[in-house]
Amino acid sequence: MTRIWINRAGPSRVHAMRMLRNNPDGHPVIIHATRTNSSNPSQMFCDVPGWEPGGEASDEEYGQFVVDYVRDHGIRVIIPTARMAALSARTEDLAALGCTVMASSYEVSSTADSKTETYALARDLGIPVPPHHLVYDSVQFRDAVMQLRSQGYIACVKPDTGWAASSFRIIEDGATDLRALLTSARPVVDMETYATALVKARQQGERIPGLIVMPFLEEPEVSVDVLSTPQGQPLVTVPRAKSGWYREFREDRKVINIAHRLVKGFPLGYLSNVQMRYLHGEPVLLEVNPRASAGTFHTEGAGVNLYWEAVKVALGMEVSVRPQLGGRVFLTEEARMVPALPR
């Protein structure tokens, strides 16, 4: 019986729990999942739900919480969702307790958390990256947008660190005209609205995070899930291109080579995800996630259970699966019964 802990487990990790329970080796597991609140779906589908500290906890405080939790519950493997730096900093302490964190080193996790630092490393590795500008105020922001426009690009903006999906915006003037309001919502904002928000934030003493301004890159977006050794040697690679409701498993050697060079160059251990889009018809790096992506479960369509194979790596077991590329999967919504909330 192997006890596996998924920290900061969100709804997408419910799929991970299913895959781990239904692992092809029939290996028994007990799945712990912690969250800052008890209403998250992950708390209803794991075997042992639990609480964890939120963003108010420092890396040191969170790391100590992790060590205590592992000691108290006999955890063998941690599948991290967040607080990568805090977890990576305590890998030796956790190893002494017989627990493996499926995470890269502290230095690697910190570098991967910054898109500009990731781009600098990628450039040193000879990997193509998009033109980009790191800005901290309205003047720098306007200058960056205008420079990209002068080069024929549509600009977009997102935070340099952290998960940027919800903060991503395409910069389009006239974004709130009637035609835009009568079509499907897009994450757009005009340049002056964004710049004004930066000015107000500065006046009110708010902290402005580093923002990366870059071209809005061409489709498709390709997300490459890679399982590797702790030293960054790729073992299983599944590229999946987004195409509406479909995910296509493409055997694209350019994309696969870029992902492998990044995984080896960082190096990234266990599960990681490399995202790419296209610039002038060629793939360029979008970002790197040193963790399992939310869509890792899509790779079941390529005939691999990546979550279980990653746990096998953490347990020192051999991995020999090969993905079946060339097919595609169709994404659907699924309704699941859950226990009634207490009145």
Image (cartoon, rainbow, N blue to C red):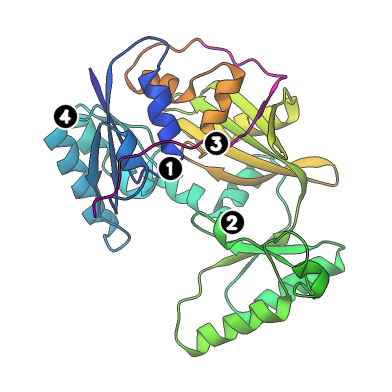
Residue pictured at 86% horizontal, 64% vertical = 151
Q: Is residue 316 above or below residue 334?
A: above
Q: Nearer the viewer, mark 4 or mark 2?
A: 4
Q: Nearer the viewer, mark 2 or mark 1?
A: 1
Q: Is residue 328 one of those drawn in magenta?
A: yes
Q: Which mark is residue 295?
A: 3
Q: Nearer the viewer, mark 1 or mark 3?
A: 1
Q: Which mark is residue 47?
A: none
Of mark 4 and mark 3, the one earlier in the sequence is: 4
- The picture places residue 28, in percent across and down from the top left corner, at 28, 16
Q: Which mark is residue 11?
A: 1
Give the residue furthest to the front: 343
- The picture places residue 6, in percent across and down from the top left corner, at 33, 37
The one of 307 and 112 positioned closer to us in this rendering: 307
Q: As shown in the figure, which amino acid type bears the numbered disc 2?
A: Thr
Secondary structure, mark 4, is loop
Residue pictured at 28% horizontal, 44% vertical = 34
Secondary structure, mark 2, is helix
Q: Nearer the viewer, mark 4 or mark 3?
A: 3
Say if mark 4 contacts mark 2, CB within 8 Å. no
Rounded to the nearest angstrom, the CA distance separating label 1 from label 3 is 11 Å
| Residue pointed to by mark 4 | 74
Q: As shown in the figure, which amino acid type bears the numbered disc 4?
A: Gly
Of mark 1 and mark 4, the one earlier in the sequence is: 1
Rounded to the nearest angstrom, the CA distance separating label 1 from label 4 is 24 Å
Of mark 2 and mark 1, the one earlier in the sequence is: 1
| Residue pointed to by mark 2 | 116
Highlighted range, magenta: 321-343
Tell me which secondary structure the magenta stretch mostly adopts: loop
Q: Quadrant of the C terminus?
A: bottom left
Q: Is residue 322 one of those drawn in magenta?
A: yes
